[in-house]
Image (spheres, rainbow, N blue to C red):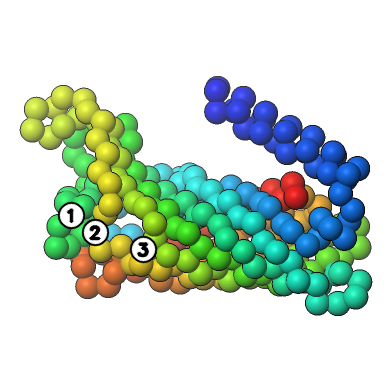
Amino acid sequence: MKRNIFLIAFLLTIFSVQEINAQIISESAKRKVTVGVDFFTDIWLNQPDKMETRTVNQGANVFMQYNFLLNETGTVSFGIGPGIMNHNLYSNSKIQDVKGDSIIFKPIIQNYRRSKVNVVYFYIPMDVKLRFKNDIKLTIGFNFGFTIDSKQKYFGDRPIDNIRVMEKQKKIEHLDKYTYGPTFRFGWKYITIYGSYQINGIFEKGYGTDNLNPISVGITLTPF
């Protein structure tokens, strides 16, 4: 319930700020800078044997881009800038040893409520943006970034004594240092459908879990 309230408040704030911007900032100035948030769910490919992921693996990106206009009318531009990317993998499995020589996911056999792997990247989104009539927008881009943080969180019974615990283990070993892949957005004004595909796996090859990578599907809000 609280999450829903915060989300509604956040959306109302965004559109309130946008109305203020429309009155204060010129259209040409707004097109030079884009600030946005992607809300999405990850569909995980190439899962290890016996892994079952949750239907919704929510994630989010926050980014800012400077837009270089490519024509006189401003309908075509190229945007580039910094961002933070956040992926989550909720499943019925847990990494046996996040500091081990190999990364092996084992199914959880005891009672549990949540098991999650989280990976955070600093990334640079590079987009070609097309604007059409009636404020319809199409964006085709490419992301490139590198890993800055990771953790595994587990909330459930401990195997040795069945005591309910909440565990957090930071800095998972053998993560691929980089992330890269294409992106797509299509929508109207400040809301667009968002999709991306990470070409490489989140883990380095040869360490037990190869080619585990996400397709992300969601929406993008660009109040600025």
The amino acid at mark 3 is Ile
Residue 199 in the image, given as x and y percentages of width and height: 45, 71
Q: Residue at x 8, y 33 (%)?
A: 160
* Tags 2 and 1 touching, CB below 8 Å: yes
Residue 121 in the image, given as x and y percentages of width and height: 44, 58
**Disc number at residue 99?**
1
Q: What residue is disc 3 on?
A: 202
Q: Residue at x 70, y 36 (%)?
A: 11
Residue 181 in the image, given as x and y percentages of width and height: 51, 70
**Mark 3 Cα-neighbour bin, 10 Å: few <14, some 14–19, many ≥20:** many
What secondary structure is found at the residue carrying circle 3?
loop
Q: Which is more toward the observer, 199 or 179? A: 179
Q: What residue is disc 2 on?
A: 173
Q: Is residue 50 visible?
A: no
The amino acid at mark 1 is Lys
Q: Would residue 199 appear left or right of 133 to someone viewing this image?
A: left
**Mark 1 Cα-neighbour bin, 10 Å: few <14, some 14–19, many ≥20:** some
The amino acid at mark 2 is Glu
Q: Is residue 156 visible?
A: yes
Whole-angstrom CA distance, mark 2 to mark 1, is 5 Å
